[in-house]
Image (tube, coloured by chain):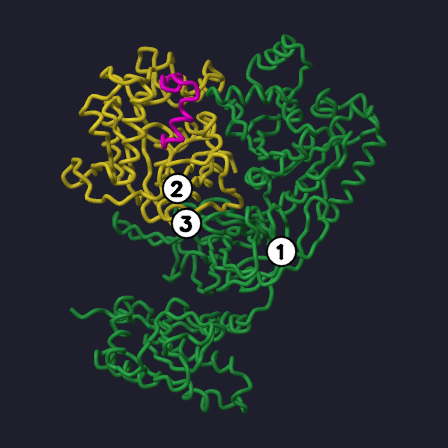
Chain colours: A green, B yellow
Amino acid sequence: MSNINQIKKETMNLVIAGHVDHGKSTVIGRMLADTGSLPEGKLDQVKRNCEKNSKPFEYAFLIDALKDEQSQGITIDAARVFFKTEKRNYIILDAPGHIEFLKNMITGAARAECALLVIDAEEGVQENSRRHGYMMSMLGIKQIAVIVNKMDLVDYSQERFENIKKEYSEFLKDIDVKPDEFIPVSAFKGDNIAIRSANMTWYKGVTVLEMLDLFKKEKHTLEQDFRMPFQDVYKFTKFGDSRRVVVGTPTSGKLEIGDEVIFYPSGKKSKVKTIEEFNVEDRKQIKANNHAAFSLEEQIYITRGEMACKVSEKNPNLSTRLMASIFWLGHDPMILKKEYYIKLGTAKVTVRIEKIVKTIDASDLSAKEKTQIERHDVAQCVLKLTKPMAYDIASKLAITSRFVIVDDYEIRGGGIIQEALEDSAKWVRDKVVVRDFKWQKSMISSAKRSEKYNQRPTLVIITGEKDSGKKPLAKALENRLFEDGKIVYFLGIGNVLYGVDADIKNKEEDPKEHIRRLAEIAYIMMDSGAILIVTATMLDQEDLEIIKATVESDKIEVVWMGESVKTDINVDTRILNKEDIEENVGLLKSILEDKGIIFKPW
Amino acid sequence: MDHLKELENTSVHILREAYANFKNLAMLWSIGKDSTVMLWLARKAFMGHVPFPLVHIDTAYKIPEMIEYRDRLTKEWNLTMVYGQNEKALGEKQTFPDGNVDRITCCKLLKTTALRDTLSGKGKRYRFDHKKGKYRVDPDTDMYTGIIVGVRADEEGSRSKERYFSPRDNENNWDVGDQPPEFWNQYKTDFAPGTHLRIHPLLDWTELNIWEYIKKENIPTVSLYYNQGDGKRYRSLGCYPCTSPIESSAKNVDEIIEELKSGKLKNVAERSGREQDKEDGGGLETLRRDGYM
């Protein structure tokens, strides 16, 4: 069968879905037969077998026969059946009709570029006709044709066809799906699959094969804004290669040498210097869906999980709260308060459900108020992430609105983001984006400063309850590092309140703005290459989020003074006993050494 | 975008995901055409380099040209080459060619067991020392937690049920019935301690795609695949006592492609020259559940 896979023709992934016994296999069998895609003599052999066992021939037997062969080692694959038309090659992806296999159905269907939904003319619209329709829409399959099969069993009745069409259209309309066509067929008899039916002259539309060839390969992703989930940065010096390249597979848009790229959520930017590809000379452009590698004019530190975008185009959303539609596949329900991971592009962030707005039964669209999301439910909910993630919303750029939920090492659900919601640090990030955009860069790079000063700029935050010994420790640490020859500075939050914050009359009024300004000062001092030690009382996680949104989040060390942490802040180190200052200073210094912030003397 | 480019893009994306997510990653290289294409795709993914070890299970019965070719590419492409073998079974002559066990048992001992021990680090690994130009015992005995394998879904039944990222427990067991879903380019890259993952970047490729890609990229392959004038060539490579060449006049890549497309091989299974598949009906699935690739 592999002879069909000629490289010159394009290949399209097709999924055939529908309720159990509505005739999916028969449709596939008939398409294979009518397009001459079967191994020689196969059809005759199956027909003869049926005669011998005196049972009526069915096209579904053909699929079974092919599956049998496969288990004997011949190259046909149940999960990936190939056939071709004059125009192109098709790969049919397996989509089991049984609800138990929804997980497998999604695995197959998510890769499809077009879908045929099969409905039995006699039985009409059933539970999985709706559920599959719903899943197609969630998976983002836009090109759908509905096949009303077994028309021979209802005497090719136009009325029956129109009724089903009406009922199912209304359902699809509710879930925002616009099918390209409803086609009345009898796969068993061959009506309207490859050949126009003489039994249904009232039908003026296309045949199934004509419909397939009318579907388009998705090319418009190139016209959309550039998005590339950042996979990695490669520098293979070990192999004598000094290039430093950023790699990923763009999901939309294109990128050229000289384009300004910006990475979210960090907001760092640079220009594309070269485009690199092994065994390919002179590539000038990177296009959506192709593996890509490029070097940058200026070296910036970025980590996996960021999304590369173009400065000249619309930026993605950035937040820690969002409204999403989730389908759940796990045996155990998805519950409130529990920690899961959300994976979108290459980002992987801890997430909790803040609120379940409603759950929907995908088989009849009935909405229920539930406190958890059960297996095979679809739910609309508010998600809260522990750090900001870059994404798009489904109505603007669907591909980068899609995510999966990981629970206990397994992908247990998927979803699409419908709306960006306000979160506590958004106002800060908005300011930071403008700041970074307008920032005048010095000729001295951060790397050069680090080399000169023998240290990496860092913000050490010492927090805890009032009078817990923060300031004495901070000052002692500053002194020790200074004696060691480090560029270091101590800054108590009080030092900022009356000068930088002088315009804020009532000091209690806007505590978050104080934090933001403190963080901005930290940003400047760290840009100068310094290690900054800051003290502030009872900082909470929201304060830390503001600081993280302002300075680079991987350059912050949080120290809590006291036996137990009294706020929700995530700390790196706890100081249990405030009395022995010298020992505590030694401890913090060794932490800075271990993390490579200052270098160990030898 | 043509179909080969689509296949290449998916494979490269998967290889990069694997490299980003697994510390102890290794790629199985059988020296055959499929895993050599996979090795080439790794060079595509990693800018001409292969930043993890290539592991070969040497049954000691491989056709000599295969070993010569392996070591030549190791040097030319600066590969981190590691091989392992079941020294105990070989020492005790527990092999089919020695006449002491049947084919399936021989496969289990020389391939499955050798593979399991080499991957876990329990068995001795030999690593090519580029300075000395020879193999030495590898000091690295860490277990590989991510193993990249060049199986194709169209090869035979059990392989068609595979995922790109497929979990195995610490006994190498594979739960075919309950596999993780894969969609939207998201794979199972998280795994519990003690388990490991098999990564299958070639799942969607067919035998024909492999040859077409070899042609497109001009990838060097072992001479055994081509008719050297005696009207015979190997379609699939294995151990010489159990693999036989097929009748074929194809002398080069173009002629092989032609043969696969329209010639007499059109509807003949690729592994028909492999004797172990025929013994013990469905033998390969049994072998694979046990950890055979």
Q: Give the quarter of the figure containing the C terminus of chain A.
A: bottom left
> What is the span of residues highlighted in magenta in the rendered image?
B273-292
Residue A368, quarter of picture: bottom right
Residue A293's disc is 3
Chain letter of mark 1 equals A
- Residue at image position (50%, 73%) is A542
- Residue with the mark numbered 2: B197
The 10 Å Cα crowd at callout 1, few under 14, some 14 to 19, many 20 or more, is few
Residue A415 lies, with reference to residue A195, above or below; the image says below
**Reading the chain from its start, which is encountered first: label 1 or label 3?**
3
Q: Is residue A562 left or right of residue A143?
A: left
- Residue with the mark numbered 1: A396
Measured Cα–Cα span from mark 2 to mark 3: 26 Å
Q: Amino acid at mark 2?
A: Leu
Most distant residue in the right direction? A159
Q: Are marks 1 and 3 in contact (CB under 8 Å)?
A: no
In percent of width and height, residue B254 lies at 41, 22
